[in-house]
Amino acid sequence: MELLGVDVVYNHADYRLMSRRALEALSEYKEINLFLRGIIPLIGYRSDYVYYERHERFAGESKYPLKKMISFALDGITSFSVKPLKIISNLGLLVSALSVIGLIYALVSYFSGSAVAGWTAIICSIWLIAGLQFLCLGAVGGYVGKIYSEVKARPRYKIEEYKK
């Protein structure tokens, strides 16, 4: 998750002791899908850790299967990062660049006479269309990411104290 821009504390639980100031700051986040593991560090107040030795479960089974854990991770990534949208844009640039290289290769093989008839036109059109689709999807994703960031209406800063 850190590679995608989500700042989380490794291997921690959702149990925490928070001051009233931190709770009031948390209440300013009006999001519906509140990913607490990412928002608490975002608030910016001083925090500390309580370390303990965690033993394996001795009774029963976890009610949190792999499917739920993956869904939880995706919620965290999409709540805090537009990097997946940027990855799509970069993939579009990469596919477009590879399609140009493929176009050059296809043209060279066509003019050297080693290409099957029709292969060059089909391959070049598929690569170019795929690259353009990724680029367009990335451009739309950039706008959607900006809209998403604005709609969340997260506080930009926190005023700790007023001096008169």
Image (tube, helix red, strand yellow):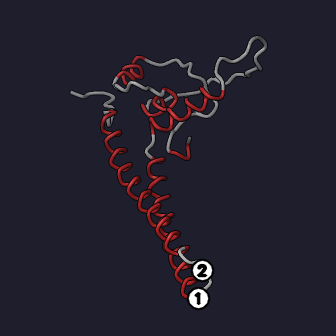
The answer to whether 121 appears left or right of 145 in the picture is right
Who's the residue at 50% across and 66% down the image? 127
**Quadrant of the frame with the N terminus:** top right
Q: Position of residue 38 (x, y in %)?
A: 49, 32
The residue beneath circle 2 is 115
Amino acid type shown at disc 2 = Ala
- Which is nearer the eye, 21 or 106? 106
Q: Crowdedness of circle 2 by 10 Å Cα count: few (<14), some, many (20+)?
A: some
The answer to whether 10 appears left or right of 92 in the picture is right
**Quadrant of the frame with the C terminus:** top left
- Which is nearer the eye, 21 or 83? 83
The residue beneath circle 1 is 112
Q: Crowdedness of circle 1 by 10 Å Cα count: few (<14), some, many (20+)?
A: few
CA gap between label 1 and label 2 equals: 8 Å
Above or below for 137 versus 106: above
Who's the residue at 58% across and 82% down the image? 109
Q: Are marks 1 and 2 in contact (CB under 8 Å)?
A: yes
Who's the residue at 63% across and 23% down the image? 50
Q: Position of residue 47 (x, y in %)?
A: 51, 28
Residue positioned most to the bottom = 112
**Secondary structure state at the residue bearing disc 2:** loop
Above or below for 28 versus 42: above
Amino acid type shown at disc 1 = Ser
